[in-house]
Image (cartoon, grey):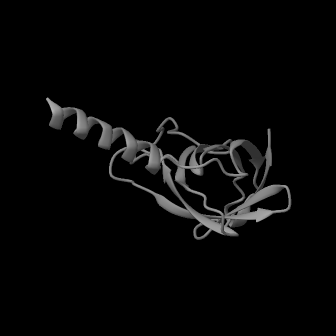
Amino acid sequence: MKRTVIFTLAVLLAGSAAAQAPTPFDGDWRGTSDGGSCNAPLDVTLSIESGIVDGTAYDTSAKGPVPNQRKAAPPAATPGLWQLHGVIGTSATSSLIATASVRDRDRRDARMTVRRDGAGLTMTEDSGCRRTVRLVKG
């Protein structure tokens, strides 16, 4: 019994020590990107809590499957929703992972670089369309 109590206390103390401290970036962030080389702007929403980032980016110009009049293979749907995750530290730049929500074997991943820009954040796509979005808190 005594060992169980000691183990439980050790786990509780370790959990509180590992908890992240709040960062100046905590809160909800929003912005719309430029179109980049693809001419496809993204509406971005990020939620940051203790430096942990969870967010989405929605491409309003994405086209889904279209009716197939010629009985040929339909064109692939373009990704309309991106999931963003990562960790923002106290450094000037951080990296996020973006995963597109597409079907079948067409998996699309990208990296985003987030930079502190005065009172806001600037997020840039490292490859692909190379879109840039300025995020404001709120």
Residue 88 position within the rendered picture, expressed as x and y whole percent measured from the top left:
60, 58
Residue 76 position within the rendered picture, expressed as x and y whole percent measured from the top left:
46, 49
Quarter of the image that includes the C terminus: top right
Q: Is residue 76 visible?
A: no
> Residue at position x 46%, y 38% from top?
68
73 to the left or right of 122: left
Nearer-the-camera pick, 128 or 114: 114
Residue 32 position within the rendered picture, expressed as x and y whole percent measured from the top left:
77, 48
> Residue at position x 70%, y 67% from top?
37
Vertical order, 48 against 131 (above or below): above
Q: Is residue 38 visible?
A: yes
Quarter of the image that includes the N terminus: top left
Nearer-the-camera pick, 63 or 130: 130
The furthest residue to the front: 2
Nearer-the-camera pick, 130 or 95: 95
97 to the left or right of 134: left
91 to the left or right of 14: right
| Image quadrant assignment for residue 131 | bottom right
92 to the left or right of 17: right
Nearer-the-camera pick, 42 or 124: 124
> Residue at position x 45%, y 57% from top?
108
Residue 70 position within the rendered picture, expressed as x and y whole percent measured from the top left:
45, 43
